[in-house]
Amino acid sequence: MDMRKFMNDKVIVITGASSGIGEAMAREYAAMGAKVVLGARREEELERVASEIETCGGKVAYIACDVTKEKDCQALIDKAVESYGRIDVMICNAGLSMRALFDDCDLEVLHRLMDVNFWGTVNCTKYALPWLQRSRGSLVGISSVAGIHGLPGRTGYSASKYAMTGFLDTIRIENLKKGVHVMTACPGFTASNVRFAALTADGTQQGETPRNEARMMTPEQVAHIVARGIRRRKRLCLMEWEGRATHHLKKFFPALVDRLFYMVMANEPDSPLKR
Ligand code: NDP
């Protein structure tokens, strides 16, 4: 089926839509005729994205929402239903990263990562699921290659993304007879604000990126691949060779993948692995 035809009139809720991958998904899916409902904490950024979508003739609603707060997630789902009467796709995309060795890290950093990445997904799923069961729709979690194999210097990030996978896999099985499609999407490095906002060992924002953002996938590429995964009702959506190689290689050569991951992350300027 043609992607525009598939997207047309679908009601799609997206968390973390104020920048990066979430913003790109909102723009692309609205441009294909979907009605998008956006959530994130920074209302002024949501307003910017929404007004640009409206200017292009798209249909959009938004509400300020901190996914770590259950009531905010309930309000996001209420907003979608009040605005458009149904939900076809829930994309749990809001996310936070980190960069520090576990040895040095305040445990508060790991709690914070679990709150946003894991609990944010759980909170939104809790309120969206009844609507997805009605529409036989799709529940999507934006995980990461770090959710397929442990990424050194990102313990809290990898753990929270693995937790998302366990949660989503189980929701899939519980809903086997209810027609809900559940997909875990695993982008590799993608140019966005995620490394700037990432937490350091003491919980302060990193404020800079240790990697060359120009050599990464773009959020628009990720948005496109995720849309294709939803249309095909895939369970796992891998994006590029790093994700595919990790997924396949680790089945047979997990120790080799350990060494490759160590090497890649130790090569970052100022890598915590070098200390
Ligand atoms: P960005 O930092 O650009 O976007 C993150 C989004 O999450 C922002 O819109 C931010 O909005 C929102 N967010 C953060 N905390 C909260 C919160 N408590 N409640 C609601 N919204 C929140 O990064 P990306 O676009 O790259 O990240 C999107 C997803 O993709 C994340 O889950 C990330 O882990 C995943 N990913 C990214 C990769 C990359 O290299 N970029 C690679 C693999 C996966 P606000 O601050 O307004 O709340």
Image (cartoon, helix red, strand yellow):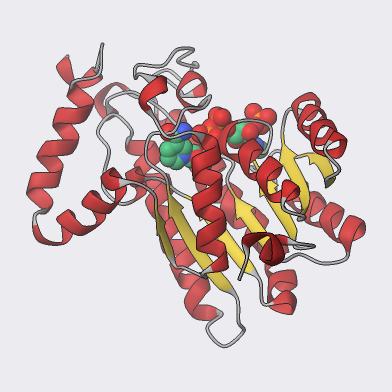
Residue 88 percent location from the top left of the image: 71, 66
Name the quarter where the N terminus is drawn: bottom right
Residue 123 in the image: x percent, y percent?
64, 54
Residue 111 visible? The answer is: no
Q: Residue at x 27, y 38 (%)?
A: 151
**Is residue 103 or residue 2 the one in the foreground?**
2
| Left or right for 25, reference 206 | right
Towards the viewer: 23 or 232: 232
Instruction: Give coordinates of residue 183: x percent, y percent.
Output: 49, 63
Give the left or right position of residue 266, taking residue 181 as reference.
left
Residue in the image at 82% along x and 67% along y: 86
Residue found 74% across the figure and 47% down from its top:
31
| Rendered view: 31 above or below 272 | below
Asked if residue 168 is positioned above or below residue 34 in the image, the reply reads below
Displayed-image quarter of ligand 1: top right
Q: Quadrant of residue 43?
A: top right
Q: Residue 249's x, y, as percent?
A: 16, 55
Task: Tell which of 250 and 122 is nearer to you.
Answer: 250
Instruction: Say whether residue 258 is visible.
Output: yes
In the image as oriented, which residue stretches furthest toward the bottom? 177
